Image (cartoon, rainbow, N blue to C red):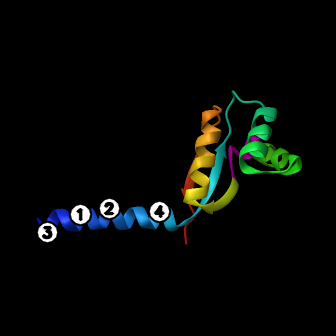
Amino acid sequence: MSTYSNTKLQEDLDTLTVTDSYCSLIVWNDDVNTFDCVIEALMEICGHSQQQAEQCAIIIDAKGKYAVKEGSYEILKPQCDAITDRGINATVEVIAN
């Protein structure tokens, strides 16, 4: 019985560590979505200005991915979901300390 309790405690700690960490919202390049589609998503979902969104789209295209926003997991996860709902690949990654 104590093994289960220790396992459950470790799972809870792992979850707290991920959700309390500082994270990046990564948008990935693809051959499907247009610049305009990505720019519109960044402006509407992440609150980027037109210029910020355009610069992010250029970097995403050139580098294959880009951290378009940083913050807590709780804030970035819904934004990531909204971006992926539009068919754009995005992930939330924990920033190493």
Q: Earlier in the sequence, mark 1 or mark 3?
A: 3
Would residue 66 be counted in the magenta stretch?
A: yes
Amino acid marked by disc 3: Ser
Q: Which residue is mark 1?
A: 7
Q: State if disc 1 and disc 2 touch (CB < 8 Å).
A: yes
- Distance from disc 4 to disc 1, alpha carbons, whole Å, reads 17 Å
Q: Judging from the image, what secondary structure is the residue with disc 3 in?
A: helix
Q: Which residue shows up at 81% across the image and 44% down it?
A: 58
17 vs 3, left or right, is right
Q: Which mark is residue 18?
A: 4
Q: Quadrant of the C terminus?
A: bottom right
Amino acid residing under circle 4: Val
Residue drawn at the location 63% of the way across and 31% of the way down: 87
Residue at numbered disc 2: 11
Q: In this view of the protein, can residue 62 be seen by the observer?
A: no
Numbered disc 1: secondary structure: helix
Which residue sits furthest left?
1
Q: Nearer the viewer, residue 47 or 39?
A: 47
